[in-house]
Amino acid sequence: MAGTGRLMHAVQYDGYGGGAAALKHVEVPVPTPKKGEVLLKFEAAALNPVDWKIQKAILRPFVPRKFPHIPGTDVAGEVVEVGQGVEKFKAGDKVVTVLNHASGGGLAEFVVASESLTVARPPEVAAAEAAGLPIAGLTAHQALTKSAGIKLDGTGEQANILITAASGGVGHYAVQLAKLGNTHVTATCGARNIELVKSLGADEVLDYKTPDGAALKSPSGKKYDAVIHCATGIPWSTFEPNLGRNGKVIDITPGPAAFWTFAVKKLTFSSKQLVPLLATPKRENLEYLVNLVKEGKLKTVIDSKHPLSKAEDAWAKSIDGHATGKIIVEN
Ligand SMILES: NC(=O)c1ccc[n+]([C@@H]2O[C@H](COP(=O)([O-])OP(=O)(O)OC[C@H]3O[C@@H](n4cnc5c(N)ncnc54)[C@H](OP(=O)(O)O)[C@@H]3O)[C@@H](O)[C@H]2O)c1
């Protein structure tokens, strides 16, 4: 298969900028799995805002590593070949994986992935549902467990959590995961998604376009121990009055203002803190999420599904910023 000169369909771009219109459908050689890698036949991929932000040069000059670049990191597929030393997988295994942003490679008929970040996918977990999990699910998991200290087995102290943009990719997983812990969850989203976010487990939901929603005010008067901040453009001055004594804002899209606040709060030994977060994918956490889906304790809300031949529609939808759950590209 790999290395035999066989070609595959892939979606790539040749340089920075250009949005969805710059995605090209090409035929390129099927990649070869190296030591510790597996070759997957693509079943589904999920997009994340960072995919198009990379195209917009947010991580220039380090990411992508080179052009042309095949974007996409969150992939579910079937193992068709394994590289040297691979022990956990064999041809025919269904898996989900997370690729690194610098190399990408997700939007293609065949995908090379590291064994160390690939997880078995049981039959109960559909490809599209699994594909949603890597970046969005792992970010929600890391923000809640590592940054906010929530124990997802429910054994921790009661905590009041605010989740902004709870209808989005990260937010909808964060609501469900937070409710596995001993938490009261306040969530923000647009009016059209209030019922959905309640159905995911949120205790109270605010429409972010109302005055109380914009002020992030808990309807029941709760002060937040932690905010999983999945929206953007909300200043510290809006969070501050809503935080409990040791309240933390975990900002998953930290810009210069957030890093400034982070530094000031640290240097002044403030009890209220801003925590910038960059997700570090871990295999065991992805395994944990897949297992929750299998057990029916976590679900992927799917905004829309697009065939690989129309990946540009999925890309445009992600840029638009109004996804409810995950945008999926599938074969
Ligand atoms: N640090 C990391 O490692 C990491 C990892 C993943 C994502 N991120 C970042 O986290 C952010 C969220 O990612 P995502 O995948 O969840 O995005 P997404 O799925 O594109 O989020 C879209 C959702 O956000 C809602 N929304 C937008 N502005 C809002 C606001 N002010 N208040 C409440 N809801 C709002 C939208 O609702 P409406 O349609 O009703 O407007 C929509 O449902 C992005 O900036 C992304 O780059 C960072």
Image (spheres, rainbow, N blue to C red):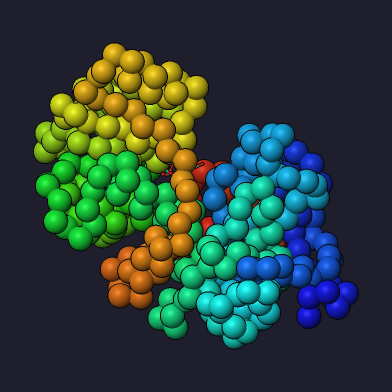
Q: Quadrant of ligand 1?
A: top left
Residue 214 in which image quadrant: top left
Residue 124 in which image quadrant: bottom left
Q: Quadrant of the N terminus?
A: bottom right
Q: Is residue 151 left or right of residue 306?
A: left
In the image, residue 310 sits, relative to residue 174, either above or below, namely below
Out of 222 and 142, give the one closest to the viewer: 142
Residue 308 visible here: no
Q: Is residue 22 left or right of residue 122?
A: right
Residue 173 rendering spot, x and y as whole percentages: 36, 55
The residue at the far front in this view is 85
The residue at the far bottom in this view is 92
Number of marks drawn: 0
Residue 200 rendering spot, x and y as whole percentages: 28, 59
Residue beneath the point at 16% across and 57% down: 154
Residue 32 visible here: yes
Residue beneath the point at 66% across and 81% down: 80
